[in-house]
Amino acid sequence: MAEPTVAVFRPDDERIDEAVDLLDSLGATPVPDPMLAVEPTGAVPRTDADRVVLTSKTGAELVGDAGWDPGEAAVCAIGPATADALREAGYEVDLVPAEYTSAGLVDALADDGADGARVEVARSDHGSEVLLDGLDVAGAYSHETVLYRLVRPAGSGESAELAADGDLDAACFTSSLTVEHFLGAADARGVREEAIAGLDEAVVGVIGEPTRETAADHGIDVDVVASEATFEALARETVAATRRE
């Protein structure tokens, strides 16, 4: 069987390189097509919170570069990649949820006594409302600081053209925004409908339920929802699904 051609949309840094290496190791032909570029805002988390939540590796790196001091606040990470980045930046991580999602983080914070606590959420401008809404329900006093904006890089969209031509076997979407930016790139190249049709013939993998919902809202059928919200799980399960087709 020929190696499946798999599009990956990680940011254009070491994450896209690691994704390409992983797909290579799985016997796939990677199509790296970064759909996210980071524009830092220069903001840092507030210093008067009881708990500070970081939801991405990018956010962890930005607060580290800024020399942010959490003081007495407990530092919480949405998952292991964010936690590793925080530790590499010199921070102690006090909480990582068992489920690496916004809902999982809300549950972990609620179990940890979020009721009445001041919770600072530091993340991108496209963070899920699930986290803030869930913290409100849990009785926390939440505040959001936007550390960076996520934009679509100029020149993205090779994968959309491949999908439109029927030359893409699979795609790994790691967030709702990667779905939206993929479609934006397809629009810019005049192949939106053809690209969606091409994805219908391919294996579409997503990192979690919110991303699946976004894809479905845009008419994209999802074949794989990763069993764990990590790129490794998403890539392995998506590539495996191409071999069952």
Image: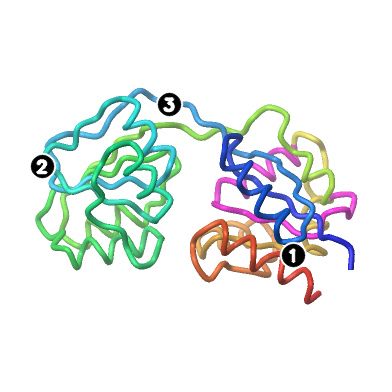
Which residue lies at the image location 35% right of the left edge and 65% below the top edge? 104
Task: Judge from the rendering whether residue 148 lies leftward or rightward of residue 22; answer left or right.
Answer: left
Q: Residue furthest bottom?
A: 244
The secondary element bearing badge 3 is classed as strand
The secondary element bearing badge 1 is classed as strand
Question: In the rendered structure, which amino acid carries the disc numbered 3?
Answer: Pro
Looking at the image, what colour scheme do you see? rainbow
Tell which tag, 3 or 2, sits nearer the viewer.
Answer: 2
Q: Earlier in the sequence, mark 3 or mark 1?
A: 3
Q: Nearer the viewer, residue 163 or 132?
A: 163
Counting from the top left corner in percent of width and height, residue 169 is at 81, 59
Counting from the top left corner in percent of width and height, residue 125 is at 42, 37
| 77 within the magenta span | no
Tell which tag, 1 or 2, sits nearer the viewer.
Answer: 2
The secondary element bearing badge 2 is classed as loop
Counting from the top left corner in percent of width and height, residue 191 is at 82, 43
Counting from the top left corner in percent of width and height, residue 238 is at 68, 65
Which residue lies at the image location 17% right of the left edge and 63% below the top edge? 112
Tag on residue 2?
A: none
Residue located beneath label 1 in the image: 203
Residue located beneath label 2 in the image: 72
Are discs 1 and 2 less than 8 Å apart at CB?
A: no
Quarter of the image where the C terminus is located: bottom right
Question: In the rendered structure, which amino acid carries the disc numbered 1?
Answer: Val
Residue located beneath label 3 in the image: 40
**Magenta-drawn segment:** 164-187
